Amino acid sequence: MRSVEKRLENLVEGTFSRVFRSGLRPVEIGRRLVREMDGERSVGVSGRTEVPNHFVVWLSPTDQQRFEEMHTALVRELCDAARDHAREEGYSFVGPVQVELQASDQLRTGAFAIEAHMVEAAGGAGAGSLLLPTGQRVHLGAATITIGRLPECNIQLHDPNVSRHHAE
C-alpha cells in the first residue's frame, strides 16, 4: 500500500511541479514531514510509539536559494510542526528534533525529498525542551536545570509569585 501511495504522490507532485513552476511552498514540506513521521513510526521496547526525529529535506538548488533568507525560521517551524504532530498523536522521539535543508542537483524546481531517521540524543539525554515566553528554547538533558528569581538560576523568572529557587 505504501509503495502505491508513494508512486501516486510522485506522479501528482511531479506533474504539478512541472505545470506550476511557481516553486515549492513551506506548507508542502511540513505536510510531507508529518507523513514521513506517520509512515516510519514503530513501537519501542517500552510500548511507546516512536517516530523519526532527524529529517534531511532535499531541495532543488533553486528552491534552496529561495528559502535561504528564511532558513532559520523555516527549520524552526518544521521542528515545531514535528513536535506538535507528535504531541497530538502521542508519539515519542529518541532524541531532539532536527531538520536539515540540503540541495540536490537531481531535483527540479518544486520537487523535494525527505529522509527521516531516528537519531538518539547525545549521551542518551532526553529529547525534551522548554519554550520560554521570550521565544528561547531550553533543551533538557542530563544536566540539572534550575528555575527561579535568583540570577544564578538557569532559567530566571521575573515574577514576585515565583520563589528565589523555585524548581530544579
Image (tube, helix red, strand yellow):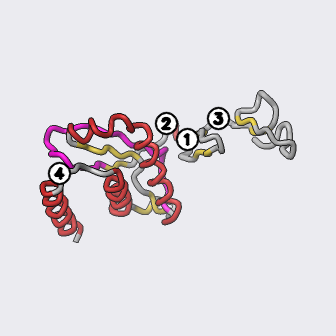
Whole-percent x and y of residue 131?
61, 45
Write the residue at 58% across / 40% down. 137
Report the quarter where the N terminus lies.
Answer: bottom left
Judging by the rendered image, the residue that carries numbered circle 3 is 143
Q: Which mark is residue 21?
A: 4
Amino acid identity at mark 3: Ala
Residue 95 belongs to the span the image colors magenta: yes
Where is residue 151 drawn, in percent x and y?
78, 28
SS at badge 2: helix
> The magenta stretch spans which residues?
91-115
Q: Are marks 2 and 3 in contact (CB under 8 Å)?
A: no
Magenta highlight: main SS:
loop
Q: Which residue, given by chain and number where applicable, does mark 1 sit on?
A: 125
- Residue annotated with mark 2: 122
Which disc is residue 27 wearing?
none
Q: Amino acid under label 4?
A: Arg
Closer to the eye: label 1 or 4: 4
Spatial separation of the CA atoms under disc 4 and disc 2: 41 Å
Near-viewer residue (74 or 89): 74
The crowding category of the residue bearing disc 4, from other C-alpha atoms within 10 Å (few below 14, some 14 to 19, many at least 20), is few
